[in-house]
Each structure stands twice: as structure tokens, then as C-alpha cells.
Image (cartoon, rainbow, N blue to C red):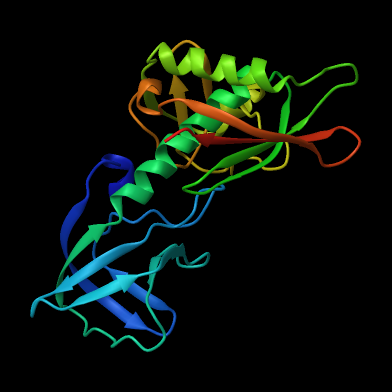
Amino acid sequence: MPERFYLDPYQRQLETTVVRHDDAGLVLADTLCYPLGGGQPGDTATLTLADGSTLAISDTRRNRETREILHITAADAPQLASGSPVTLTLDWARRHRHMRTHTALHLLAVVIKAGVTGGNLTAESGRLDFDIPEGMELDKDAIEAGLNALVAKDLAVSIQMTSGEALKTRPELIKTMSVTPPLDLPEIRLLEIDGVDLQPCGGTHVRSTGEIGRLLVKKIESKGARNKRVVIALAD
């Protein structure tokens, strides 16, 4: 079953229970928190305990071996007993900026017709690195205009599911040159921006490009002979 941050990335609060809390982190029976991955930061949140006290979640990670989602608390925070009921409240303002920026980076890959060699985002900005062919010039104003034209179209953003085997037959959908999706998986998420983009992505996204708001191209810098980094930011 898909995880809750995929089922509804807009859900902000959840009643759940503690499975385990140790030095590695806090495991909950269910969570809204997206774990660090795919260039998107792990979520932060607040846990409210039965007595009304609160515990801050400063980061969210996934255990690579067990695939459990680990909620990171302060080193001196009290460890919660297994079975404790808690209310998880997502740091929504931060998550929503991640969603807007992540979808904006997909638009950036539409505007710039070149292979993507890397990327990252924060609540403040996002960047993609491109393998720019010889003779291709990147114009800051033109890129910004192209991005905001796609935002203004308010294109629907949706998720499709495919398999690794099916994706092998459509290699053109894999735009990131440095990272290939795990093609052995039975299910792989594809992000579709209506009419302009379809590619694998494990992040959280807004419902439509209009929700992103106006975008700024902050800078374009060289990161090698052909590698160009384009940094964008939300205008608000």
C-alpha cells in the first residue's frame, strides 16, 4: 500500500502510535513525514503526547535495510514507550514549499532541453545541473519567462504507476542521467504534468502548476566543461 504522504500529500495531522523509539530514531505505526530522498529534504513535525506535552521531529530518514521511516528527535529528548498514542502535526509551511519547488524543478527540466545530471531542493530554492551540449546557451530571462508561462497555464499534476519492466521499454522518460530508478521494482511512480512532462519521481508535489506561484531564476553557474547549474526560487 502506498505511504500516506503519497496517498494525500496535503494531509497535515494524524493520530498514530509509537512502534519503537531508540537511539536510531522514532518509528510510528503510520506517518505523514516524507523521508529524505530524491533531492527532497526529510519533513519536520511536532508530536503531541497524551498528556499534552510535545516532541519535535527535526528530520525524517528511511532505514536503507529495513525501509522503516525514522523520525529524528533531539539527543536529549525522552524516549517514548511502545504503543504510546501521539498526534503528528506536519510542519506544513515547509513541506508545501518543498512540494511547490519540486514541481517547479520538473518544469525547469521541460524548459531546458538537456540531460539532468543532478538536483536538490530546500524550502528556499531548488537547483538542477544540466549536461549542456556544445553551442547551447542558457539565457536567464528566457528560462524564467518559460517557467512562469507554464505556471500560468495551471497544468494538472498527477501520479501514474508503472513497473520497472515497462519503464525499461521507455528509457526516454528517465531524464536524470546520474540516477536510474530501481528497475527491478514492480511499481514505480511517474509524475505527469499535463501535456508537458512524464518521468519517474518519488517526491511530493502540488496538484497543479498554478499552485507553484511565480518563479525566479537566481543564477546560472558552470560546474565543469559542459555542466551548468540553474538555481531557481519561489518569488514568495
- Residue found 39% across the figure and 76% down from its top: 25
Q: Residue at x 40, y 29 (%)?
A: 212
Horizontal and vertical percent position of residue 100 = 42, 35
Is residue 99 in sight in this rendering? yes
Q: Quick check: 81 above or below 175?
A: below
Residue 183 can be seen, yes or no: no
Q: Position of residue 144 (x, y in %)?
A: 59, 21
Say above or below: 48 vs 196.
below
Q: Is residue 77 left or right of residue 135?
A: left
Residue drawn 39% across and 15% down?
155
Q: Position of residue 40 (x, y in %)?
A: 51, 48
**What residue do we see at 45% from left, 20% from top?**
193
Residue 217 occupies which quadrant of the picture?
A: top right
Residue 168, image x and y in percent?
62, 28
Foreground pick, 138 / 82 = 138
Q: Quadrant of the C terminus?
A: top left
User: Measured along the vertical axis of the image, is residue 46 above or below residue 216?
Assistant: below
Horizontal side of residue 133 vs 171, given as left or right: right
Q: Nearer the viewer, residue 233 or 99?
A: 233
